DNA sequence: TTGTATGCGTTATCAC
DNA sequence: GTGATAACGCATACAA
C-alpha cells in the first residue's frame, strides 16, 4: 500500500479532486470530468448542475499538471529571448504574451544562455517540460536550440531572425529595406563617406544589415564604406567600435549603426571627441526604441514594426500548433525611416 | 482496454520512457528511476552504468510533467508583471529569471490584467498549474491575486510594492527616502513652490510617494505643494496631468514626477507651452530608466537599486520555497539621487 | 447519458 | 540493492 505520505507530512489541506466530487455526488469520476469540462451532450442537465454546485462547494480546482499528463498537452509556449530588458525584445515579448494568453496559452520565458551547450540544455529542459512549442527571438545561426527543436519536433517560430536553411518559420524585419531607406536618406543629404557599425557577425540581423549595407552602397553608386563590428548590440560595444572609426584620418561624415543602442555608443564617443552631431557627423540608428526621440539630438532611426512582429509571431505560432505540418513560411515586416535631428548634410569641407 | 489512441493518431515517435529502458536492461522501472536520478547508495555501480548507457542509446528524455504530478512540484515560478516592456520591470524580470534559473527554476511570466476578475482568474490558473510560487511585481492594494495566493498557500514575494497588511514578504524601494532626497535637493536649490505629479492612487508606490511628498515638505519647512494624479505611470498620463498643473496661475517652479515616464510627459507639456527646463521649471523623475541621461535636458532622477531588487526578490523567493513558514519580511532598498541637468535654481521672479 | 477500466510517465513506500 | 505495488489526478475508448 502507498498512501503517499512523502511530499508533505504535515498535509495542510487536501484540495478536492474529481474523485471527491464524484463521491459526494454519488456519480462516477468520469461523469464529473465530463460535466466540469462541459463536454456537449454527454451529461444530463440536472446532474451537471449538481456537480457544479458541489465543485464550488468543495472548492474544487482542477490540477492542470494531471490533465497535461493525460492529454499530452500543456498549453505552455516557451519564449526564448536573449534579454528581456532589451528595449526591442521587451515589447515583442509583451506582445506575444498578450496574444498567446488571449488564446489560453501561458508563456514560459527563458533568457538565452551564452554557451551553446547551455542553450542545448535549455531547449531540452523546455522540451522535457512538454511545452507546446517554441518562440525563439534572435536565434543565432546554427543554434543548438534549433537542433533540439527539430529532433523533438517542436512547433517553432523564429522571431527577428530568419533560419538560414529555411527550416523554420519566422517573422523578421526586412533588413535590406531598412538599409536602403537609411542609405537613400543619407545619400540625398549629400553624404558619400558613410560608415557602418555592424552588430556581431554571429547574429543574423548583424550579418544581414552589413551585407545589405555594402550592396546598397553599390546600388546607389556610392563608394564602399568602412565597416567596423561591435562586439554586441550594446551602448558600450557601440562606443568601443566607434573609437576605432572616429580616430582614423578619413573620418566618415555619416554613420549607420546596426541598432539604436550602438548608435548611442557612437554618440557617446563622438561627444567625447568634441564632434558635433549632426554638424560634423550624421548618425542613424535602427529600431526606434523608446526615448530616442527625446535624446539630444533626437535620433534619426528606422522603426521596426514591433507590434506587427509580436502579433504575427503569435499568430504563426498558433497556426503551427493547430497544423504542425504547416509549410515553413517567412513573414517580412516593412520598416519605416524616422527622420529626426541626428542627420544633416555633411560639413562643406568634407562633402 | 485503452491504448489511448486519442491524442494523435499519427503517433510520430514514441520517445522512450523509463519502462522501455527497464525492459531493455532487464531491470525494474523503479531501478531505472533511481539510477537516472542518481539516488545515492541505492543502485549498484555497474547496473547504473548499463542503465545510463541504454538511456543514451534509446534517446531517453524524462517527462517532467509526469514527475511533477508524482512529486507535486513543478519547479516553476510564476512572475506576474504589469508590463514586461516597462523599462523598470523589464530589468527586474530579467534579473529574477537569471537568478531563478541558476537554481533550476523556470519562470512562467504573465502580465497583470486590468480587471480584478481577470486577475483572480490568472492567479487561479497559475495555482492550478501547480506553480511553486508567485513573484508579483507592482501588486495593487487589495489585489485579488493576493487573496488567491493566501487561499492556495502559495509562497509569494511582492516586488516593488509592499502589502499594506504585511501579509506577504516583499522587496521594495524605500520611497520615503527617495522623496526626501528629491525634496532636499530642490530645497537646496531654492525652490519653494514644488508640485508632485503622483502615480495612480491604486498603486502603493503612487500612494507612498505622495504621502511622503506631503510629509517631507512639512519636515523641510516648505509650504504644502500641489499634487495632481496621473492616471497611469505613462508618458501620456504624465502629460495630461501636467496640463492641469502648468496652466494654472501659480505655476510651481519645480515638479517631482512619480516616475521617469511621467516626468517625460511633464517635459512634453512644458515644451508645448514654451517653458524652458530647467530655466523656468525644474523637473525630477524617479527610477533612472535607461536613456534618461541622454535626453535633453538630461533628467535628474532617483536611481532604484534594480539589480538588488531582482536579486533579493529571487533570494527571498527561494528561501520561502525552502521554508514556507518563514516569517513575513520586508526588504527596503536604498535609492540614490542622480543629479543631472533638469534641475536648477528657480527663476529670480518666482523664487 | 453513465459507468468501467485503463493508462499518461514517474516516483515513493515497503518488503525482500 | 532490487522488485513489486501503488499511487499522483485526470480523461478517454468502450460497453452498457
Image: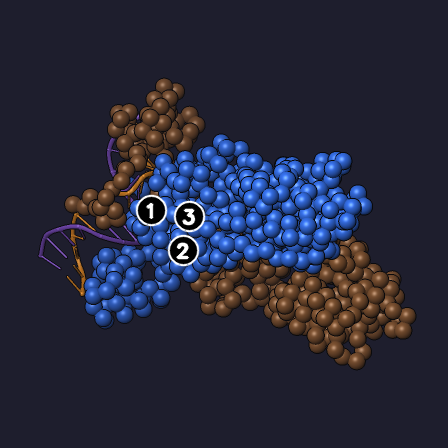
Chain colours: A blue, B brown, C orange, D purple
The answer to whether B251 is drawn above or below residue A175 in the figure is below
A52 or B221: nearer the viewer: B221
Please state the horizontal and vertical placement of residue C3, each as a whole percent of the image. 17, 57
- The residue positioned 74% from the left and 69% from the top of the image is B270
Distance between mark 3 and mark 1 Cα atoms: 10 Å
- The residue positioned 80% from the left and 57% from the top of the image is B341
Query: Are the residues flagged by discs 2 and 1 from a single subunit?
Result: yes
Chain letter of disc 3 in the image? A
- The residue positioned 71% from the left and 54% from the top of the image is A344
Kindly state the secondary structure of the residue where label 3 is placed: strand
Contact flag, marks 2 and 1 (Cβ < 8 Å):
no
- Mark drawn on residue A315: 2
Of the image marks 2 and 1, the number of the one nearer the N terminus: 2
Chain letter of disc 2 in the image? A
Kindly state the secondary structure of the residue where label 1 is placed: loop
Of badges 2 and 3, the one in the foreground is 3
A227 displayed left or right of A82: right
Distance between mark 2 and mark 1 Cα atoms: 15 Å
Residue that numbered label 1 is attached to: A327
Label 3 neighbour load within 10 Å: few <14, some 14-19, many 20+: some
- Mark drawn on residue A15: none
Please state the horizontal and vertical placement of residue B172, each as a whole percent of the image. 65, 55
Of badges 2 and 1, the one in the foreground is 1
B263 or A28: nearer the viewer: B263
Residue that numbered label 3 is attached to: A330
Distance between mark 2 and mark 3 Cα atoms: 13 Å
The answer to whether A267 is drawn above or below residue A230 in the figure is below
A49 displayed left or right of A247: left
Amino acid at each position: 500500500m502507498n498512501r503517499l505520505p512523502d511530499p508533505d507530512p504535515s498535509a495542510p489541506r487536501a484540495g478536492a479532486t474529481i474523485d471527491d466530487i464524484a463521491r459526494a455526488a454519488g456519480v462516477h469520476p468520469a461523469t464529473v470530468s465530463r460535466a466540469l469540462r462541459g463536454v456537449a451532450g454527454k451529461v444530463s442537465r440536472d446532474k451537471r448542475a449538481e456537480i457544479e454546485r458541489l465543485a464550488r462547494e468543495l472548492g474544487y480546482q482542477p490540477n492542470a499538471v494531471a490533465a497535461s499528463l493525460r492529454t499530452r498537452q500543456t498549453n505552455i509556449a516557451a519564449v526564448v529571448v536573449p534579454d528581456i530588458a532589451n528595449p526591442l525584445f521587451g515589447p515583442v515579448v509583451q506582445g506575444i504574451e498578450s496574444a498567446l494568453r488571449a488564446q489560453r496559452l501561458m508563456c514560459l520565458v527563458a533568457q538565452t544562455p551564452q554557451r551553446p551547450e547551455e542553450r542545448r540544455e535549455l531547449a531540452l529542459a523546455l522540451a522535457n517540460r512538454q511545452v507546446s512549442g517554441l518562440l525563439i527571438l534572435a536565434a543565432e545561426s546554427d543554434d543548438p536550440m534549433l537542433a533540439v527543436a527539430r529532433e523533438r519536433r517542436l512547433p517553432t517560430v523564429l522571431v527577428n531572425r530568419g533560419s538560414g536553411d529555411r527550416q523554420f518559420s519566422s517573422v523578421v524585419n526586412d533588413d535590406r529595406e531598412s538599409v536602403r531607406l537609411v542609405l537613400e536618406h543619407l545619400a540625398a543629404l549629400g553624404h558619400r563617406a558613410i560608415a557602418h557599425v555592424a552588430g556581431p557577425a554571429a547574429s543574423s540581423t548583424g550579418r544581414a544589415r552589413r551585407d545589405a549595407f555594402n550592396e546598397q552602397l553599390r546600388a546607389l553608386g556610392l563608394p564602399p564604406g568602412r565597416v567596423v563590428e561591435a562586439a554586441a548590440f550594446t551602448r558600450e560595444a557601440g562606443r568601443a567600435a566607434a573609437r576605432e572609426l572616429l580616430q582614423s584620418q578619413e573620418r566618415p561624415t555619416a554613420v549607420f549603426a546596426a541598432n539604436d543602442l550602438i548608435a548611442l555608443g557612437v554618440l557617446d564617443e563622438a561627444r567625447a571627441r568634441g564632434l558635433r552631431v549632426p554638424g560634423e557627423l550624421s548618425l542613424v540608428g535602427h529600431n526606434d526604441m523608446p526615448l530616442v526621440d527625446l535624446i539630444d539630438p533626437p535620433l534619426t532611426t528606422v522603426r521596426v514594426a514591433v507590434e506587427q512582429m509580436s502579433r504575427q509571431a503569435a499568430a504563426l505560432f498558433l497556426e503551427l500548433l493547430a497544423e504542425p505540418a504547416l509549410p515553413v513560411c517567412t513573414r517580412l515586416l516593412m520598416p519605416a525611416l524616422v527622420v529626426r535631428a541626428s542627420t544633416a548634410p555633411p560639413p562643406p569641407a568634407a562633402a
